[in-house]
Amino acid sequence: MGGLVGGKLSMADVPLGPFAGSLITVYSAKSKAANLHVSRRCGQLRTSDVRTVDVPLETTTMQRLCSRCAALGAWGRPTTALGIFLRALGGVGLLFELQSYTEADEEECWTDEEAGDAAALLRSEQDLDGDDDEGVEGGTSLAEAREDAERLRDLIFSHWRGAGRSLYRAQAVLAHFPWLQEWAKPSLTAKMRYLEMLRGQAARFVEPEELLVAASATTLPTPEFPCAEPAFAVLGSSSRVSVALVDLWRRWQSAAGRPWDRPGVRAYLSYEIVRDVRSNRKGYDAARATAARLIESWEEWARTAATSADRAPTRRLTVRVPEASEATARHDGRDFLDGLDMWTLGVLVTWTVDADWGSRVLTLEVPDLVAERLLDPTSDLSCSPVGGAADPPERDRDPEIQPGIVRPGVFDDTPVFDRRPVTLDHIRALRTLAPEADQLYLVFSASGGAEVLPLDTIERRLAKG
């Protein structure tokens, strides 16, 4: 049976695989038709005469669960295999992710035409010294239209990041429960289709030419500065002029590395060089104008270097996309792909040709100039050439992304003959699926017998083999 797309998924829809028939403790009123509850304290269990019973985990059992208990899925001890499986499904787990980012949100919806118009407006060269209050079609000022377009651009990029994060989380859970893969395919297909649509819309806001110029600007060597230029005398001594020009260069190079900052925006950096000079002082205007011409020469230098470079996307790279940890995300609100600069995000939406979001590995085809910046040790991404010695190992050989399949007998307090040996992959699965995993465990081994150990110690021992 395939996962539902366009309908609402519930716990009763989920294939139980090897957990089918597992005994769970439920509570209910004494009526035969009463709903089942997984907690005696459930707010929907409105009786003092509560019946407690162990029942097999089956579809019919799921169908009798009250809506609150079915949605939360907090059943059994959280660090048993069954508890991990059920908690991975409910709440904001797999069922939530499979129903998220499959189509446009009704509350935050925009048309493809609106995205195209906004991108066209932001890509067009605007005279920043002109009248921003000048009206455009519909009576909206140019400044307001630009702000609206920027908001839509940010919204589309935010949805693209959210859709990528959601697909990654869904696939990360499915890797531990392979019997769910076929059932989840329709929902995953819808998520991938919507993600690709968002990527295409986000790419409209990015000009590949500007990405090349930005890459060029960040690799330019420090030039000789005109410290003896008479127009800069108003800044003070030659050493102060030198410091001001070095600072201007660094500010320009940083701004030039952001492809959404148009050259006209960067021209305003010329005011930085005279920020400590009174605007009515003689020499102020000359110093600012000379700085503006200097910035223009740097702009032309970067553009010329980009033009002379090979623009064809001939280099094939694999990149590992970083993910904010759950703790970091809760602490400062960071989202999936947050922390990457806009140049890097622009590269990802422009030149991605293949994506495995489950392992956060994307394949890019980029021009040489872009590849050089991505492969630089200061890059925000872990990146390597396809076919090179530094390629990420194959999925089934990489211990960092090898999934531990969670099934009955793993982590369970069951008779010894029913238990399965715990592997390093199982410990990683436990950390992924059980937020409260860091605690003490009773373990048995041939060498140590029965021991009570923290999870870190168990993990280190397994890593040593």
Image (tube, helix red, strand yellow):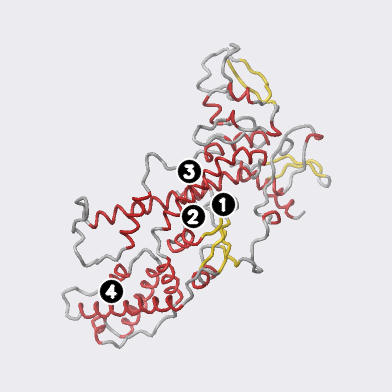
Q: Residues within 10 Å of mark 1 (few under 14, many from 20)?
A: many
Q: Which residue is mark 3?
A: 101
Check residue 270 in the rendering and tell me which mark sits there, or answer none. 4
Question: Which of the two marks, 4 or 1, is nearer to us in this view?
Answer: 1
Label 3, label 2: how many angstroms apart (C-alpha)? 16 Å
Which of disc 3 and disc 4 is earlier in sequence? Answer: 3
Q: Where, by quadrant of the figure, is residue 128 drawn?
A: bottom left
Mark 3–mark 2 contact, CB under 8 Å? Answer: no
Q: Residues within 10 Å of mark 4 (few under 14, many from 20)?
A: many
Position of the C terminus by quadrant? bottom right
Q: Secondary structure at mark 2?
A: loop
Q: Which mark, residue 337?
A: 2
Q: Which mark is residue 357?
A: 1
For label 3, count other residues whose C-alpha is less than 10 Å away and answer few (under 14), some (14-19) or many (20+): many
Label 1 secondary element: loop
The mark found on residue 448 in the picture is none
Between discs 2 and 1, the one toward the N terminus: 2
Q: Is residue 377 left or right of residue 430?
A: left
Quadrant containing the N terminus in the rendered view: top right
Quick one: label 4 or label 2, which is nearer the N terminus?
4
**Residue lying at 41% horizontally and 41% vertically, measured from the top left:** 105
